[in-house]
Amino acid sequence: MAIKATIFKANLQIADMDRSVYADHGVTIARHPSETDERMMMRLLALALYVPADTKHGTLEFAKGLWDPDEPDLWHKDLTGQLIHWVEVGQPDDKRLMKASGRAERVTVMCFSQAAAIWWSGIKNKLTRARNLQVWQVDADQSQALAGLAQRTMQLQVTVQDGAVWIGDGARTVEITPARLETA
């Protein structure tokens, strides 16, 4: 019998001063049995950073990136089904990113492990044609600290200002400073 996904619920109170997005979002996250708390919390961070200011043109949603090779971790589709934003978490291969670049208006990767620099140096030269791609790296110590906030039910405050992100649960706060990686 297959192990089922673990369900987490989070209420995000987002104050993103860089994009003027202020909202509360209640989300349900299905954590795949092979997924770590660190990766799940990185998906939640990506949602907080890229959720649109309004839903007039669709919204950002969790997709089936771990289960389905044709879907990202998160995606923003407009009301007609057009793929606006494709978001990957981790270290996807260059073929997947080039395919995503052709399907979506915008592609974002959030990498976070100790091996991210090695992964990036191996694929960055293959992605020069992907003009709609942005790759961000979160320091491994920061992503591991973020994983420490994971609980089955979470109440998180997310503040974004000048490119820095603070995520707190009322008792602890983690600072995340994503760094943009450049293609060759």
Image (cartoon, helix red, strand yellow):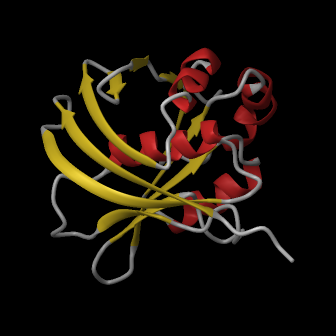
Q: Position of residue 59 (x, y in %)?
A: 30, 65
Q: Nearer the viewer, residue 142 or 28?
A: 28
Q: Nearer the viewer, residue 128 or 14?
A: 14
The residue positioned 38% from the left and 81% from the top of the image is: 81
Residue 67: name its quadrant.
bottom right
Q: Is residue 69 above or below residue 106?
A: below
- Residue found at the very far right of the displayed protein: 1
Q: Position of residue 6 (x, y in %)?
A: 61, 60
- Residue found at the very far bottom of the displayed protein: 80
The residue positioned 36% from the left and 59% from the top of the image is: 27
Q: Is residue 43 above or below residue 166?
A: below
Q: Nearer the viewer, residue 16 or 70?
A: 16
Q: Position of residue 119 (x, y in %)?
A: 78, 31
**In the rendered view of the protein, which quadrant contains the C terminus?**
top right
Q: Is residue 131 left or right of residue 155?
A: right
**In the rendered view of the protein, which quadrant contains the N terminus?**
bottom right
Q: How many numbered marks are there?
A: 0
Q: Is residue 50 above or below residue 159?
A: below
The residue positioned 38% from the left and 19% from the top of the image is: 172
Residue 3: name its quadrant.
bottom right
The residue positioned 20% from the left and 29% from the top of the image is: 18
Q: Position of residue 170 (x, y in %)?
A: 29, 26
